[in-house]
Image (cartoon, grey):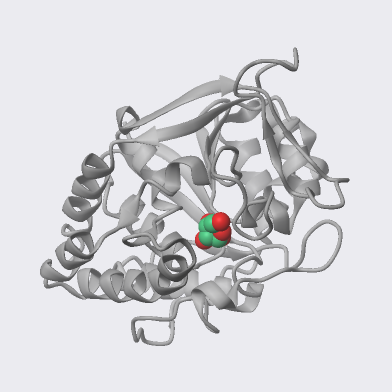
Amino acid sequence: MPRKIIIDTDPGQDDAVAILLALASPDEIEVLGLTAVAGNVPLALTQKNARMICELAGRRDIRIFAGCDRPLAGQLVTAEHVHGRTGLDGPTLPEPTMPLQEAHAVAFLIETLRAAPEGEVTLCPLGPLTNIATALREAPEIAPRIREIVLMGGAYFEVGNITPAAEFNIFVDPEAAAIVFGSGIPITVMPLDVTHKALVTAPRNAAFRTLGTPVGRAVAAMTDFFERYDREKYGSEGAPLHDPCVTAYLIRPELFRGRHVNVEIETEGRFTRGMTVADWWGVSGRAPNATFMGDLDADGFFGLLTDRLGRLT
Ligand code: RIB
Ligand code: CA
């Protein structure tokens, strides 16, 4: 039986690859819908990009909902410097023609979780946690109904990418992250500690292009664009492919290794706001609340990703 998921997303080239991987894996994953959130770029663009990605995958049937256009507190911080003005720079994709759903993303999250059997639906946030936290605040009774939250966000040993201490998704909305990590829902975290080991090297990028399909070419163009910033910043041999770690985990969890630890979200720190304080060595005495990933089989990850993307013609 495929796992029923809702992907909450701020596309974002890496979000796009994560969504394509999910849509290419119907035996393991059933996508109930996509909920767009403001993050990499403003909401008007993230909801549009989500529709463009589904049309690229030939999935005009996927329901896409627009959610929150700003964090719970403070101003929206975006990342055009990484993802380009559109948030999906790199490939030339046609304007979307599939509709955006009328309902607000938060309403969709709440209604879907209320209607589904307890423990059936997994939430996969790939951006700031504003939509998820808002749903939990509006309808606290949905928390025990959620099977698991598998999210991309945070960092510990790898430290921050938007500030010295914080990873972007958490930094944009630390209050939302604190609500999610304090919810008691089973959480699996794909932090920079693991995503920075998923580097799109030139041979891996070439493997996408060699698929010879519109999806393969588009993904190669996305990761080509996306990597220029990270390669310059880290001098690494390719860009870290953050968000696809979430959907790859649902398909082959054995590719990942981590530790069940306590993770708290710093919301007050002058220099550390948005930091995920992961108690990796168990020194705090605080109860573990998340499985925090630290390592992955990178060749296995890219082998899975390339094989699955090849199924989208
Ligand atoms: O820090 C990386 C995360 O921020 C990824 O999800 C990327 O898409 C951006 O949302
Ligand atoms: Ca993202």
Q: Please, is residue 241 above or below residue 249 in the view?
A: below
Nearer-the-camera pick, 247 or 118:
247
Nearer-the-camera pick, 11 or 29:
11
Q: Residue at x 68, y 45 (%)?
A: 110
The single residue placed furthest to the top in the displayed view is 285
Q: Please, is residue 37 above or below residue 279 in the view?
A: below
In the image: residue 257, left or right of residue 34: left
Corner quadrant of residue 138: top right
In the image: residue 99, left or right of residue 175: left
Q: Please, is residue 269 above or below residue 118 in the view?
A: below
Question: Where residue 65 appears, x then y in whole percent?
Answer: 59, 64
Q: Which residue is drawn at 72% across and 68% down?
A: 77
Nearer-the-camera pick, 15 or 221:
221
The total number of labels drawn is 0
Question: Where residue 214 appears, x then y in whole percent?
Answer: 21, 75
The single residue placed furthest to the front in the displayed view is 235
Q: Residue at x 26, y 71 (%)?
A: 220
Corner quadrant of residue 171: bottom right
Which quadrant, please, contains the N terminus?
A: top left
Is residue 160 visible from the viewing direction of this image?
yes
Which quadrant, please, contains the C terminus?
A: bottom left
Question: Where residue 84 appears, x then y in whole percent?
Answer: 51, 80
Question: Where residue 212 appears, x then y in whole percent?
Answer: 11, 72
In the image: residue 17, left or right of residue 37: left
Is residue 107 visible from the viewing direction of this image?
no
Q: Residue at x 61, y 21 (%)?
A: 261
